[in-house]
Amino acid sequence: MNECWPALRETQIYSPNLPTWAGAQTLWEGGSGHHWARELQALGHTVRLLHAKIVRPFVSGNKTDATDARAIWLAVQQPGVKFVGVKTVAQQATLTLHRQRESLMKMRIMQTNALRGLLYEFGATFAKGKKALFSEIEETLEALVDTLPQVVVDSLREQVVRIKKLDEDMLTIEKRLKLQLKQDPQMQRIAKIPGVGLLTATAAIATMGDASAFKSGREFCAWLGLVPTQTGTGGKVRLGSISKRGDTYLRTLLVHGARSVLNSTKTPGPWLNGLQARRPANVVCVAQAAKVARTIWAITAKDQEYQSAHKSIRPQAA
C-alpha cells in the first residue's frame, strides 16, 4: 500500500465518519482510476468511483490534494449520489481498440481532405466519397506530371499510400474486435439487436462497465445523453433537445445504427410507424437509438437473450 499511496493521494479518501461507507475507499474517476479501483478491490476494500463532474462543484479555491480530498468527502455524502461501475481489464482493453480505431479514422479523414485540397489548387476535382477519390487519383497524378515537379508528385503518391495504410490498420483493429465479440457472451447477445453491429456491441459492453450501476434502461439512456433536457420553473417543466451528455462515441454509434434500421427495415412495426407519422426523421432516429440503448441494458442487466416480439410489462404498484 505504501507504494500505491503516491499515485492515489489526489483521488483517495478514507471516511470512517460515514456509517454506510466505513472502511470503504472512494476514488475520483480520472486517469488510471479504474486500475487503482481493481487494485484496491484485490486487497479486500469496497471501492466506489465518483465521476469528476459530481466532485467538481465541491472544489473551492485552488486545486490541492487536501481540497480534492475534501471535495470527494463532501460529494460522497450527497443524497442520491451515483457511482461509476468499475471496468474490468477486458472492457478497458476493448475500449483501447476503439480509441485507436477512432484516432486512425480521424487521421484518415484529415489526410484525405488535405489531399483533395492540395490537388484542387492545381484544378483537379473529384466526386464525393473515398472510393471516387482513389479510383481517379492515379490518372490525375499522371496528368499533373508535366505541370508539377516530380518531387511534389512523389510526395502526393506517398500520401495516398499513407491513407491506404490507415485503412489496413483499421481493418486489423476490427478483426481484433471480432475476436473480442466471439469471446464475450454479452456482446454476442446484444449483437442480435437490429441496428447493433460489431462496433456498437463491443463498445456498449465495454463502456457500460457493470450494468448494475444503472437502476434502469432509462437511467442508462440519460447517462448516454439520449433523453431530452428539462428546464422548468413554477411547476412547469419544458422538454428540449437531447442532453448529449455522456460518451459521445457510443451515442454516435447508436444513432448511426438506428438510422440504418430506419432506412433498411421492411417491417418497422406499429411503434415505429406511429412515431414516423407524427415526428421528424431525426427525432425518430434518436428515439430508436434510445430504445436500442434500453434494450441493451435490459439484456445485459437481466442476462437474457434478445426477443424481437418481447413486450415489457410495467410492474404493478403494491
Image (cartoon, grey):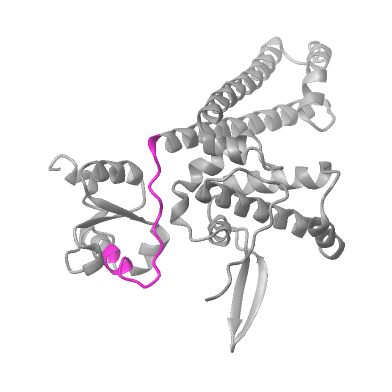
Q: Residue at x 71, y 26 (%)?
A: 115
Determine whether 115 is above or below 155 in the image.
below
Residue 202 in sight here: no
* Residue 86 is inside the magenta segment: yes
To which quarter of the image does residue 14 belong?
Answer: bottom left
Q: Is 184 displayed left or right of 138 in the figure?
A: left
Q: Magenta: predominant secondary structure element?
A: loop
Residue 223 position, x and y percent, is 53, 58
Q: Which of 242 and 137 is in front in this view?
A: 242
Q: Nearer the viewer, residue 134 or 142?
A: 134
Count the marks: how many?
Answer: 0
Q: Nearer the viewer, residue 267 or 110?
A: 267
| Residue 26 drawn at (x, y percent) | 28, 56
Q: Does the magenta stretch include residue 9?
A: no
The picture places residue 120, in percent across and down from the top left corner, at 79, 29
Residue at 80 percent across and 56 percent down: it is 272
| In the image, residue 109 above or below residue 24 | above
Q: Is residue 178 visible?
A: yes
User: Which quadrant, please, contains the N terminus?
Assistant: top left
Residue 6 appears left or right of 91: left
| Quarter of the rendering containing residue 202 | top right
The part of the image, by quadrant, that contains residue 270 is bottom right
Q: Which residue is rendered at x = 83% and y = 62% of the image?
A: 274
Residue 30: x percent and y percent? 36, 49
Residue at image location 51% in from the left, 33% down from the top: 184
- Is 80 above or below relative to 65? below
Which span of residues is magenta-colored?
71-89
- As drawn, the residue found furthest toward the left would be 2
